[in-house]
Amino acid sequence: MAKSIIQYVFYRILRSILSILGAVVIVFILSRILPGNPAVAILGPKATPENIERVIREWGLDKSYLEQFGVYISRLLRGDLGDSYIMGYSVSKLIAERIPASLELVVFAFIISLILGISLGALAAKKHDTKLDLTLTSLSVLSFSSPILLLGVLLLIFFGVNLGLPVGGRVDPRYSIKTYTGFMLIDTLLSGNFNAFIDAFIRIIPPALTLAIPLGGLLLKLSRNSILEVMMQDFVKTAKMKKLPERVVMYKHIIRNALIPIVTIAGIYFAALLTGDVIVETIFAWPGLGRLVWEAVTLRDYMVIQGTVLVVSIIYITVNAIVDILYMYIDPRIRG
Amino acid sequence: MAFPRIYLVVAAVIVVVAVVVATIFFTTKPITQQVEKILVVGITNDPHTLDPALLADIASAMVAQNIYDSLVGYKPGTAELAPKLAEKWESNENATIWTFYLKKNVKFHDGSELTAEVVKYTIERAKQLNGPPSYLLDVIEKVEVVDKYTVRFILKYPFAPFPYLATSTIFSPVPLNATNLEEKPIGTGPFKLESWKKGEQLVLVANKDYWRGPPKIDKVIIKIYPDPTTLRVALEKGEVDIAFGLPPQDVEVLSKNPDIKIASVEGLVIEWLGMNLRREPFNNTLFRKAINYAINYDYILNVVLRGTATRLYGPLPPAVFGYDPEVEKYSYTYNPELAKKLLAEAGYPEGKGLRELELIISSAERAERKDVAAVIQRNLKEIGINVKIIDLDWPSFLDRLFSHDFDMYMVDVYPDYIDPDTYIVSLFTSFGYKIDGYNNTLVDELALKGRQTIDIQERASIYKQLQKIIVDDAPWAFLYVPKMYAFMRKNVEGFVLYPVYYIDFYPVNKV
């Protein structure tokens, strides 16, 4: 038993390393297949062949792809993600600066969608085939099919103009908040500026809702169906016949078993959200990973593209591993 | 457990939210007028680097211009030269040797002094770093220190517009042995960089020891709003004091807002429709003239651009030295009948025998370009020319432009220095960018003569001739000159908009 677990873990780690390596190679090739290069992108219409050649030579982009890849890998093995061509400083620093903003927004959005999605899903399942159920499931379809751009702009206008609340950015620029953790909600409290905390708290709501509403809708539908399915199973009937209190049946027996598919989807979504949503980050002036990648692609800043994709794939794989562990915890059969 | 945990969690969340909402309503007051005067500036692009030797984008230049000083500046609100770090300058007779006399007692933020040695170092360092804008220094053979405050530039060839070139950020002095300027800039300018959160904001603080006296505001916060809609909302709510980079369609809406004032100035950027003269049918001047007459310029200016741009009649925008107003009389105007006639004369009556032509653009870089291209497509269709618009991302567009893989393109360019030389040489001569494949030995000759002539009258007459020749040859369809805008709250005073990309926060005050 124990041996097989170790074997499993070993196999998983090996597979993860291989997938990361694959991602590194693919992104290296893809970013160089794109037409144009960073010298062209930064020089614009002034990118004469002589100007391009000069900048490209300076940046080492005139070497063969194989040579460039060799340099990249050897630096990578020393834990160095390289330097941005356009900005001149280190990619790891650039990414490290953006991760807290992304993480803060995603965790916030994730909590909202989990609470809304699962609780409303359970409610819909409990009252299945009633008007309430119909309303909730229709709303869920509407929410996960609403385009994020439209939703974002509507929320921006609603919060910013109709409610007159502060929107855009992480905190009012006039508060000078020192960076301790990079998480604005924590940093504002650590600086003892309660007004700034409130301001940051209000500002995170509309972008978080933009991310949370589609995911919440999806989780609602998913958890409703999953809970309904479990409710029909024999062990639930047995529990009910044993005259266990309804709450105990619902939480100990039904939801726990219904959670498994939800955890899978939620886990994948969490990782996907964390890699950044360029639309939400653009609309709400949120300095996250999504915009960093987007800008790097539009400027063909190869090192930044490569570095970010590497970090993102590591996040994906880690989250997947955590989901697997959660399975074991939730499902006694897997724990077996 | 009778009371399931999930209820506790939900209850806790509700309580927390309720408490927070309550506090929002009861405790938050508007940020009270602090003792410090803070100016919040909203921009739509993220600066890349603050090293003058490396920066080549507008957002970086805007920040750098307030941290560093250039050798030569502009008279407020104009593109005319004015002394800055250099008190005066002069050249030898054939414009190959330029001597600059520096202002004395100018200190860098680190306390070191500005000397001729520093200027020499700045230029040599930039040449050695070979960054994207280093081509601007190609004209310089070497830099000599004459005395402590006098520096001499020896040029490779005669170059009359050199003082204009010296306004570029790459000429801004940096202290000796400077390191990591891209993140920790040290200049002689009115502001110092306090902090920079990439993708989010930069904070500049007043340099109290500035050689022209301390600035009127204590702090400038430059905040990045990638979406112009969000920036507009922030401006309307008063979170932002000055906004740059809002699209032209916002001009109409914001001009009705009593809390907001708009500064505008005729710019120096030109937008044109280029053609590939290496290919059929564009190697035929009659065909190119037909296109020039087919475009409804007034419709583009009034309906699509809503008065946010003026017509470009020839190779030069009206605000630059040497512009000849005569061009407005002899250049092309909308005349579809004449266009049809010329098209027939070119050998394509009603467009017969023409393939579908490709017009490449990049609208990500300028959103209104897509609408203008659609108008041109419709206008050309009306005289029998079928055009397909291909909208590419910026680097892909440039890649096709420089590999000459296009029929037609639309782009704009910002001059490197405010002189007709940069427009003519880079865009129309055989020793420039060579995008269109336009070749006229007379243009080459006159362009060289123009950059070597010091006498102002003589120069003006050279550029007058050049405009006539180029308009006659019609290598482009000349489209428009976008106006430049700055949007600000009513309480912002002293801000002056320049026709050049020069954003100066030094004279700005908030009342």
Image (cartoon, helix red, strand yellow):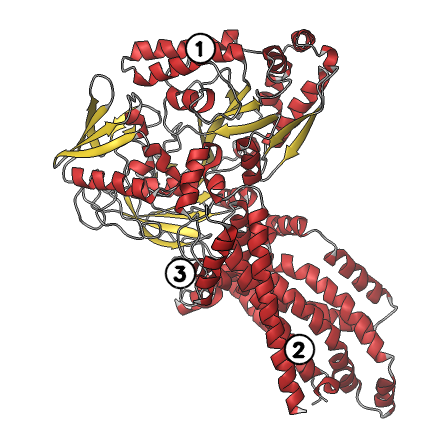
Please say whether residue B177 is visible from this viewpoint: yes
The reply, left or right, for residue A214 in relation to residue B60 is: right
Residue B254 percent across, percent down from the top left: 53, 34
- Quick one: A15 or B376, which is closer to the camera? A15
User: Can you tell which mark lies on residue A324?
Assistant: 2
Whole-Å distance between the Cαs marked 2 and 1? Answer: 74 Å
The residue furthest left is B147
Say which chain tag 3 marks.
A
Whole-Å distance between the Cαs marked 1 and 3? Answer: 54 Å
Residue drawn 62% across the image and 12% down it: B293
Residue holding disc 1: B325
The reply, left or right, for residue B95 in relation to residue A151 is: left
The reply, left or right, for residue B177 in relation to residue B425 is: left
For residue B18, what is the image quadrant?
Answer: bottom right
Residues packed near mark 2 inside 10 Å, few (<14), some (14 to 19) or many (20 plus): some
Closer to us: mark 1 or mark 3? 1
Residue drawn 63% across the image and 78% down it: A11
Say which chain tag 1 marks.
B
Q: Amino acid at mark 1?
A: Pro
Q: Are marks 1 and 3 on the same chain?
A: no
Quarter of the figure that contains the C terminus of chain A: bottom right
Residue drawn 35% across the image and 49% down it: B182
Residue B63 percent across, percent down from the top left: 37, 43
Q: Are marks 2 and 1 on the same chain?
A: no
Residues packed near mark 1 inside 10 Å, few (<14), some (14 to 19) or many (20 plus): few
Residue B412 percent across, percent down from the top left: 51, 29
Q: Tell me the element at label 1.
A: loop
Residue B236 percent across, percent down from the top left: 51, 42
User: Can you tell which mark lies on residue A177?
Assistant: 3
Q: Tell me the element at label 2.
A: helix
Q: How many marks?
A: 3
